[in-house]
Amino acid sequence: MKNYLFLVVFICYVSVLEAQEKPHSHASSRKIEFPDIDGFKTLVSDFHQHTVFSDGNVWPSIRVQEALRDGLDVISMTEHLEYLPHKNDIPHKDRNRAHDIALKEAENHDLIVVRGSEITRSMPPGHSNAIFIDDANKLLIDNPMSVFKEAKNQGAFVFWNHPNWIAQVEDGVAKLTKMHKKLLKNDLLHGIEVVNDKTYSDEALQIALDNDLTIIGASDIHGLIDWAFEIPKGGHRPVTLVFAKEKTESSVKEALFEKRTVVYFNDLLIGRKEYLIPLINASLNVIEAKYIEKSTVLSVTIKNDSDVDYLLKNLSKFTFHNHSDIVTLKSHESTTINIKTIEKLSTLDISFKVLNGILAPKINPDISFKINIDGF
Amino acid sequence: MKNYLFLVVFICYVSVLEAQEKPHSHASSRKIEFPDIDGFKTLVSDFHQHTVFSDGNVWPSIRVQEALRDGLDVISMTEHLEYLPHKNDIPHKDRNRAHDIALKEAENHDLIVVRGSEITRSMPPGHSNAIFIDDANKLLIDNPMSVFKEAKNQGAFVFWNHPNWIAQVEDGVAKLTKMHKKLLKNDLLHGIEVVNDKTYSDEALQIALDNDLTIIGASDIHGLIDWAFEIPKGGHRPVTLVFAKEKTESSVKEALFEKRTVVYFNDLLIGRKEYLIPLINASLNVIEAKYIEKSTVLSVTIKNDSDVDYLLKNLSKFTFHNHSDIVTLKSHESTTINIKTIEKLSTLDISFKVLNGILAPKINPDISFKINIDGF
Amino acid sequence: MKNYLFLVVFICYVSVLEAQEKPHSHASSRKIEFPDIDGFKTLVSDFHQHTVFSDGNVWPSIRVQEALRDGLDVISMTEHLEYLPHKNDIPHKDRNRAHDIALKEAENHDLIVVRGSEITRSMPPGHSNAIFIDDANKLLIDNPMSVFKEAKNQGAFVFWNHPNWIAQVEDGVAKLTKMHKKLLKNDLLHGIEVVNDKTYSDEALQIALDNDLTIIGASDIHGLIDWAFEIPKGGHRPVTLVFAKEKTESSVKEALFEKRTVVYFNDLLIGRKEYLIPLINASLNVIEAKYIEKSTVLSVTIKNDSDVDYLLKNLSKFTFHNHSDIVTLKSHESTTINIKTIEKLSTLDISFKVLNGILAPKINPDISFKINIDGF
Amino acid sequence: MKNYLFLVVFICYVSVLEAQEKPHSHASSRKIEFPDIDGFKTLVSDFHQHTVFSDGNVWPSIRVQEALRDGLDVISMTEHLEYLPHKNDIPHKDRNRAHDIALKEAENHDLIVVRGSEITRSMPPGHSNAIFIDDANKLLIDNPMSVFKEAKNQGAFVFWNHPNWIAQVEDGVAKLTKMHKKLLKNDLLHGIEVVNDKTYSDEALQIALDNDLTIIGASDIHGLIDWAFEIPKGGHRPVTLVFAKEKTESSVKEALFEKRTVVYFNDLLIGRKEYLIPLINASLNVIEAKYIEKSTVLSVTIKNDSDVDYLLKNLSKFTFHNHSDIVTLKSHESTTINIKTIEKLSTLDISFKVLNGILAPKINPDISFKINIDGF
C-alpha cells in the first residue's frame, strides 16, 4: 500500500516554537528592525553621511534625528576632506566639527556616533571613508598613500566608497587599480561599498570576496533621508548590519575589522554565508506545524521577525497546496505553507533558496528548517 | 582597446515607445485589469460560484454585484446538482434559478453570465463544472458517465474542479483515475482547475499539459468575495483570463475549448506559453531607454500595465547598476533598470526569466526585450 | 498688579488621571467601541436587518458574521411579515426561520440574537419592528391594531421604523397619525427610529421626546454591510447603544423599555441627556494637566476612548493657545489643549458644547471638566 | 391644502453648474490648493522661515525644495539679525546670504523668493519680520525704532511675529505696548502673526482688526517641515493665502499692504470678510440639485475644491434628510445634502454658518447658496 494512502484521522497540533503572536510593534514604523544572531547583537549602521560641513544640506543635528527615527545604532558624519563647496560660508578650520555637533545632539540617546572623514580623490583611488579616527584635521595630506597611512596610524577602519560611481568609472564597473592593490597589500583598505545610495554592484561584491574586504552599504546622504529613500512610502536607507559582541564603539570597530556584516538594500540582504544565513535563520521561526485534519497535508506557519520580505524557492521534493514553488514571507507577518508530504511524517527537513539573499554574484543562500512534528 | 573604455560624451535620449505617463486610473481599484493580447481580448472570468441555491450564503444578485466591482467580464453560477443543504427552505424544482436571477441582475451591465452547474460526485470522478449548458434540470441523472454525456449533448464545456481537494484526495495530489481517463477518451472533460479558492496544484497543471486540457482557476466562492480574498487589503479572487476574439458568450466558449487561458492567482500567472508570454509582453512596455550622461550605463524604464507584480531574473551577461539580478516590476508602475552595457550600444536584446509565471511545474517563461537605441 | 502678570517659575506636572497610554488596540479596526457608563454596560445593537427570508440578499449566517466583525453585542433578524419577494423560491411556512438560522450561527460567540419581525403596512401606521417576540407566525394577522396587540401579548418591544421614509411620506417629515396616537395610548408602541440606514430625522427625535419613546437607530440592511456603509473607508453602520445592567437578553429588553439608548450615526451621537452626557464623560478622560514652563498656559491632554470624533466648542472665558474655540477630539487619540488661564490656577472648570451630540433638534449637550491641578 | 402635500410626480434634474467631475488631481498630494477668487489669484505663502544662517537646521536649498513640494507660490528666508547661534561656524558678513542661496535654488521654478529678515528683540517690541527689503545688512542697527525706519526706507512690509509667544509674554496673550502703538502711529508695522507654528491667537486677531493690520500666518520653521507638521499623516504648514492681481513679487507686496489675506491653519481659515467669504464661495460649488423622485426632498450636491474641510451649520428653516444641522464638506470631495423643502420649489436660498471660518474672535462667517432649480 502506498504511503500516501496511509490514513490518519486525528489532528496533530504541533507547537515547534511558542505560538503566541506578539503584537505588531513594527506596523507602519520606519525603524529598521532585525533580530540578533547567536553570539552577536545585530546593530544597524550608516557610515557614510554628509552635512553642510562639506556638500550636504543639513546641520549635523538633523542627521542624528533622522538616525533616531530610523532606529539606527551607530552612525558617522563623513565630510569630504577635499571638497568644501560651502567653504565661503563655513570656513571651518576644524574638520571634526560635524562629528562634534552630532555627538552632542546624540547625548542622552542610545546612538553611537563615530568620528569619520571622506578621503576624496579622483580615481585612483577614488573616494574612501576612514572611520574610528582620532582627528580629521591630521588627514589633510596631499599624497594619497600618506593619508591612508595616517588613517591607519589613528587606528581607522577604511573602506572604498562607491567603486561603481559612473562619474569616476564611466561603465559603472568596480575594478581594482594598481593603487588599490598597493593599499590592500599594505592593509590600508579594509572594506568596500557594495551598496551606495541607490546603487548595487555585483563587481564590488566580487572584489570584497576576492580580497577579503568587509562588505559595506551606506546612504551617502546629502539631502533628506525622508525624501531620498521615500520613507512615507515604506522605503528605507541602505544600511550595514554589524554583528557586534556588545553595543559599544569598540565592539562595532572589532566587528567591522572581522568582516561581520550584512548589507540591507531595498529588498536585498547581501553578505557572507557565516552571517547572512544565521541572520535569515534568526528572522524566520516556525511557530506551528500540524497536519490538516484527515489529510497528509502539513500546515507550517513561519513568522518573519525582520524588516525584509524573504523570497523563497522550494528545493524540496514536495509540492505545496497553497503556493507554487516560490513563497514570499512578508516582513513582520506570519505565513502558512501547506506541504503535501504524501504520507504522515514525524519530522520534516525542508530547504529553500533565498532569492533575495546574495552571497556572491548570482549565488543565493540555501536555508533549511528541521521541523519536529509531535502528536504522531 | 577594451570596449568598456570606449568614450562617448554626449547624451542619447531615446524614446523607444511614447513616454507620456497615463494617469494611474488603476490606483487603489479592486477591478482586475490585464491588457489585451494580439488578436484577442483578455476577458476576466470566474466560472465557479455558489449561492443560496446550493450551499452558498448569498442571493445570486450579490454574485453579480461582486463581479461588477471586481471588473469581471464573464461569470457563471455553478450550483451543486446533488448537494442542497438549504433545500428545506429553498425546495427549488428548477435548477436554472440561480442563473436566471443572476442574468436578470446583470441586465444593463457589460457582464456575460453563462449557465452552469456543478456535477457533485464522490471521487471518482469528484466534482466537475459544466458551463454553457442549456438546462441544468436535464443533468439530474444518477449515472455519472450519463451526466457528462448529457452535458456534452448540450454543448457544454466541462472542467474538473479542485482535483487536489483533500476531502477527496487526502494527500492533496491531483491524479487521474480510470474514470477520468474514460471521460477524456470520450471527450467529456475539457478543462481542469489548477487553482481553486486558495489552493494551487502543480500536479493538476501537469495533468492539463499531459492531456491537453484547458487550464482553469476559479474562486469557488460560498461566502463573500470581499472577506474570502481580503479585497480591502489588496487581495483578489483567482480568475481565468480568457483570450477571446470578441466579448461574446460564443467567443468565450470557443476560447475555452481552444485552451486560450491564463490563470491569475495571488501573484502568479499560470498558463501555456502561447498565451502567457504574449500576456506578459503586452503588460510590459519599454517607455524610455537612454544612456546616463557621460557613462555607458543604459537607463531603461519599463511600464507594467497589468495587475500583477512581475518578478524577473536577469538572464543577460550584463549586470545592473541599481538592482541585483532580481527585479520586481510593480503593478501599474514604471520601473527603471540601469544596465551596465560596458560600451555604448545602438540596440540591446535583454532576456529575463519570469519567476512568477508558470508554464509547467518548475518551468518559468523567459521573455526578452529588443531595444532600439536612437541617438547613437 | 494684574493677575496675568503673576509670576510662577517652577513647572507643575499634574497627573489628573494615570497618564500611561494604552496601546491603540482599536487602530484600523471596524469593531464599534464605546466605554461603559456608570452602572451600565454599553451594548452595541442593530435591531433592523433583512435576509433572503424577506427582501434581503444574504443568508442569515452572513448577518451574524457581519455583526461579529462589527463588534456588535445584540442583533435581530426582522423580516417583513407581509412582503416576501422571494416567496416563490423560499415559500417558508415558518416565519421564525431567519432568526433560528442566525441563532445557530451565533452559537459559541458572545452575540445575543433576539427574535423579531417587521410589521409591514402602508402608512398609517407604516412599518414597525417587534422584537423580543416568542413566535413570528402568530403575528400574521390582517388587522393592524390586532398585530400590535399580539406583539404586546408576546411581551415585545415595538418601534416605528423610518417614520421619515419618503416612499410613505413624500416630504420626509415624520409625523404622528391618529393611528399612532392610538397605538401610543394603548402602550403598543415603545420606540421610534430617529436614524434608519443613511437618514436622520429631527422630527422623529422630537416625536420621541414628546411621547416618551425610546430613541432607536438601525441599519435596515438588505445588501452587504461592508458595501452599504463603506467599511473599508472607515464607515460604520448606524447602531443603537443600549445601556444595560448586564449583557443578557432580558437586561437589553429592560434597557429598551426604560429608554436607555443613544444612537451612533456617522459622526453623531443622539440621545437623552441622562445617557448621552455620561457616555461623553466616560469617553473623554483628562490624562495630564500641567502648566507649560515659565508661563500661565495650562496644557491639558484629553484621551478619547470612543469611536466618535467629538467636536467641541469652548464655552469658557479663556482662549486657547493652539486651537480656536472649536476643538476636535479624534477617536481613540489624545488631544492637547493649551489654555491661557492668565494666572496660575490650582483648579480649573472648563465647559464645552458638544456640537456632534444631539439632545433635541438644535440642542447640543454641554459637558464640563473639573481639573484639579497639583503642584501649585 | 398644505404646501407639503403638493404632488409632483416627475423628476427634476437640475444642473446648477456643470456637473462633470474633474479627476482628483489632489488625492494624497501634499500640495496646498485653494481656488482663485474673483479678480485675484490665490497665492500660497510662508514668510517666516529659518536656515543654518541663523538658528535653523537646514541649508536654504532645502527650504526651497520643501516649498516646491508643498505647492507654495512665495516664500522668504527670515534669518534673525541679532541671534546667530552658529556664528562660530558660519561667521557670515553678508546677511543676505540665505536669501541669495534660496533665490538661486528657485531658479527655473515657479516660486517667488522675497528678501526678508527677522528683527529679533526682547519685548517690546519682540520679534518682527521685514520682507521685501533691499539689503538685510543695513538693518543691523541697535535702536529698535531706527531698524523699523530703515525697513520702511527700503519699502519693506513689516509684521509682528508671534505676539503670543510665552517666552516673551508668559500668559500667551498678545497685547499692544506703547512701543507698538508708536510703530503703528508711524506706519512702521503693517501686519501681525495670528498664527505662528502650532499656535493661534484670538487676541492677535483682535489687534489686527482694531488696528487695521494684515492678518498673517507662518510656519516659523527651524527643523524640517515634514516632521514639524507631520506631512505624511496629512498635516500641512500654516500659510498665508495672499490674493494678488498677478503672480509677481510686486503684486504680492501690494496685496499684503492692502490686507488681502486669509490664514490657513490646521482646519481653520482666518481672515477678513472681504476675502474669506469669496474664498469659501470659490471653494464650494453646487454641481447638482434635483428632487428625489416622488418626494419633496431636494438633493443638493456640493463640490469642495479646496484643501480644507468646511464645517457648516444649517441656518435655514428646513431640516435635512441625511444630516443633522451640522454638515462637513470634505476637502476635494462632493457631498450631497438632502433638504426637506416641504413643497417643491423652483429656487432655494440656503444659508450656513461656517464653523471653521473665523472673521473675529467668536465670529464665524455666514455663506449662502442661491439654487435655481430647473424642470419645475
Image (cartoon, coloured by chain):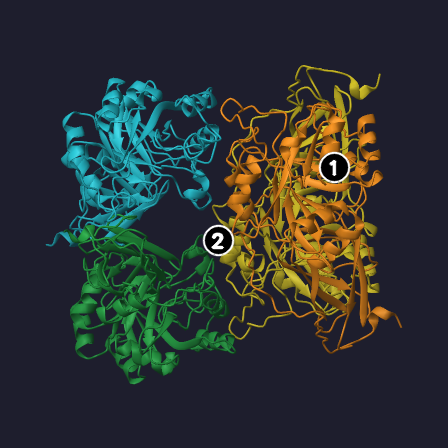
Chain colours: A green, B cyan, C orange, D yellow
**Along the line of sight, which residue is nearer the eye, C216 or A253?**
C216
Position of D254 relative to D60 (above/below): above
In this view, the mark in front (2 or 1): 1
Using the rendered image of the protein, determine whether residue D137 is visible from the camera's viewpoint: yes
Residue for point 79% across, 40% down: C213
Residue D27 picture location, percent across and down:
52, 41
Q: Give the quadrant of the C terminus of chain B.
A: top left
Q: Quarter-wise, where is residue B375 in the image?
A: top left
Q: Quarter-wise, where is residue C165 in the image?
A: top right
Number of on-image labels: 2
**Along the line of sight, which residue is nearer the eye, C294 or B347?**
C294
Residue for point 69% across, 17% down: D374
Using the rendered image of the protein, determine whether residue B292 is visible from the camera's viewpoint: no
* Residue type, numbered disc 1: Lys
* Residue type, numbered disc 2: Glu
Q: Residue furthest left?
A: B1
Judging from the image, mark 2 belongs to the subunit labelled D
| Distance (Cα) linking label 2 and label 1 | 79 Å
Position of B12 relative to C118 (above/below): below
- In the visual, does B101 lie left or right of D2? left
Discs 2, 1 touching: Cβ within 8 Å: no
